């Protein structure tokens, strides 16, 4: 992997060579090919897909459906009917919660973990409240691990849905989704996986994991903002009611009633983000051109380096796993005596971009008894030099805040 060539593929990185962008869990920078593909849709293919019978509209439809096939192939779904385009992970999870959650009855249980992003928590809170169901949480230990025994103990005959992040956006923990999905299925529950942080960083095979739903966002893997995916097993998608109602999701409408379009269109009401879908397909092709295994290997190397360098910063404590391997490129930390917002602002003055706050995971913050933290998250295009700059800058933060050392 030639890192200079890779960085040259990202116009923003070339535009600001002084910036160390270490907020990749929030959103990835965009390769030129993706930006060009999205633009090309508007320059050469723009018409409302799935409607027009004229040639231009057919091209738009073809481009959109090809993008769906590319996503299907990437996550190893059985059929393109199982790929629903949404705006982002948040919308995908709301769709799953609102539609499959509509089958919940009084006293049924939904099980999630304490490390869920609000997007995989609040939709379940809301649907449980509406259906009279009970929302239960499985905890993680100090290492950020959800152990199998704790998970087994939390699943009961009343558990109807389990929803869990594949990789935590705060701790970087990789949850054992395959095992947890098997246990959930044995109890008769469906398994919803939040793949926002996993799909861009590790190969994900929905058939191998045997999850019922998988949600992810394009923008975290170099695609444009505003395009996301909900994978769902066909038999479940067929059973559930639509999410939004309106154009393109119907089969036949009378004054009193309507019937629904075939999958996947039943869940894609209104004009779709076809240019975004084409951009997502291009992002997938970009990953494939680099070879995903090499991306994983590169991010692993950088992660080991980052863990070592951050661990050498005095007064800094990394939350979660005590080994680099447990973090999957996500390092959340606190610096004794310094508010995380101050850390982020001081680092910003050094042209280093990290995130600070509760990371949309307040239940996890409560569980860890830490109101907020700072977080650096890496991607394959980062360099050892950027990570070194992060560590060196962090070493100066306490002094710049007025501490003796
Ligand atoms: N986490 C972060 O900085 P959207 O915003 O819909 O694309 O993704 C929501 C989401 C859901 N689940 C997980 C595990 C996530 O990490 C995110 C997004 C970003 O951590 C923005 S808050």
Image (spheres, rainbow, N blue to C red):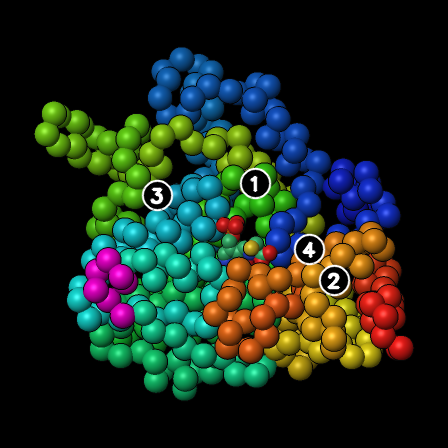
- Checking the image for residue 81, the label placed there is 3
Which residue does the numbered mark 4 point to in the structure image? 23
Question: Disc 4, ligand 1: is the CB inside 8 Å?
Answer: yes
Q: Which mark is residue 225?
A: 1
Q: Depth-wise, is mark 3 or mark 2 nearer the camera?
A: 2
Residue 53 to residue 13: above or below: above
**Comparing labels 4 and 2, the label whose residue is closer to the camera:** 2
Other-residue count near label 1 (Cα within 10 Å), few / some / many at <14 / 14–19 / ≥20: some
Q: Secondary structure at mark 1?
A: loop
Determine whether label 4 and label 1 are within 8 Å by CB: no
Quadrant in the picture for residue 179: bottom left
First in sequence, mark 4 or 1: give its number: 4
Residue density around tag 3, few if under 14, some if 14–19, many if 20 or more, within 10 Å: many
Q: Which callout, 1 or 3, points to the residue nearer the camera?
A: 1
Question: Considering the image in quadrants, where does the C terminus appear?
Answer: bottom right
Q: Quadrant of the N terminus?
A: bottom right
Label 4 element class: loop
Q: Do the residues under discs 3 and 4 have CB atoms within 8 angstroms?
A: no
Number of the label disc, if any, that sits on residue 342: 2
Q: Earlier in the sequence, mark 1 or mark 3?
A: 3
Magenta stretch: includes residue 267: no
Would residue 132 be counted in the magenta stretch? yes
How many numbered dots are placed on residues in this image? 4
Lower position in the chain sequence, tag 2 or tag 1: 1
Q: Which residues are magenta?
A: 128-134
């Amino acid at each position: 992997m030639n890192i200079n060539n890779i960085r040259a593929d990202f116009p923003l990185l070339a535009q600001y060579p002084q910036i160390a962008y270490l907020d990749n869990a929030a959103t990835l920078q965009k390769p030129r090919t993706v930006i060009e593909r999205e633009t090309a849709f508007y320059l050469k293919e723009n018409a409302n897909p799935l409607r027009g019978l004229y040639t231009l509209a057919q091209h738009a439809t073809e481009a959109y459906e090809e993008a769906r096939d590319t996503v299907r192939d990437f996550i190893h779904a059985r059929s393109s009917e199982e790929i629903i385009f949404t705006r982002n992970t948040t919308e995908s999870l709301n769709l799953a919660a609102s539609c499959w959650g509509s089958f919940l009855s009084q006293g049924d249980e939904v099980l999630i973990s304490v490390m869920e992003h609000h997007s995989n928590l609040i939709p379940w809170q809301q649907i449980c409240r509406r259906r009279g169901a009970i929302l239960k949480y499985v905890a993680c230990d100090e290492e950020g691990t959800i152990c199998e025994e704790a998970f087994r103990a939390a699943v009961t005959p009343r558990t109807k849905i389990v929803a869990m992040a594949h990789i935590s956006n705060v701790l970087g923990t990789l949850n054992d989704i395959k095992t947890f999905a098997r246990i959930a299925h044995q109890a008769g529950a469906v398994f919803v996986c939040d793949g926002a942080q996993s799909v861009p960083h590790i190969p994900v095979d929905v058939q191998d994991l045997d999850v019922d739903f998988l949600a992810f966002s394009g923008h975290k893997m170099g695609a444009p903002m505003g395009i996301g995916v909900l994978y769902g097993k066909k038999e479940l998608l067929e059973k559930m009611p639509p999410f939004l109602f309106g154009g393109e999701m119907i089969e036949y409408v009378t004054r009193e009633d309507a019937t629904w379009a075939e999958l996947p269109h039943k869940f894609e009401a209104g004009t779709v983000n076809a240019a975004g879908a084409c951009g997502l397909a291009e992002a997938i092709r970009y990953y494939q051109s680099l070879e995903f295994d090499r991306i994983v290997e590169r991010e692993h190397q950088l992660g080991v380096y980052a863990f070592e360098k951050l661990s050498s910063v005095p007064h800094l404590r990394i939350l979660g796993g005590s080994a680099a391997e447990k973090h999957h490129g996500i390092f959340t930390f606190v610096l004794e005596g310094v508010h995380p917002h101050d850390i982020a602002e001081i680092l910003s003055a050094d042209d280093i971009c990290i995130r600070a706050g509760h990371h949309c995971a307040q239940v996890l913050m409560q569980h860890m008894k830490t109101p907020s933290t700072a977080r650096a998250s890496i991607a394959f295009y980062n360099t050892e030099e950027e990570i070194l700059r992060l560590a060196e800058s962090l070493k100066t933060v306490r002094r710049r805040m007025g501490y003796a050392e």
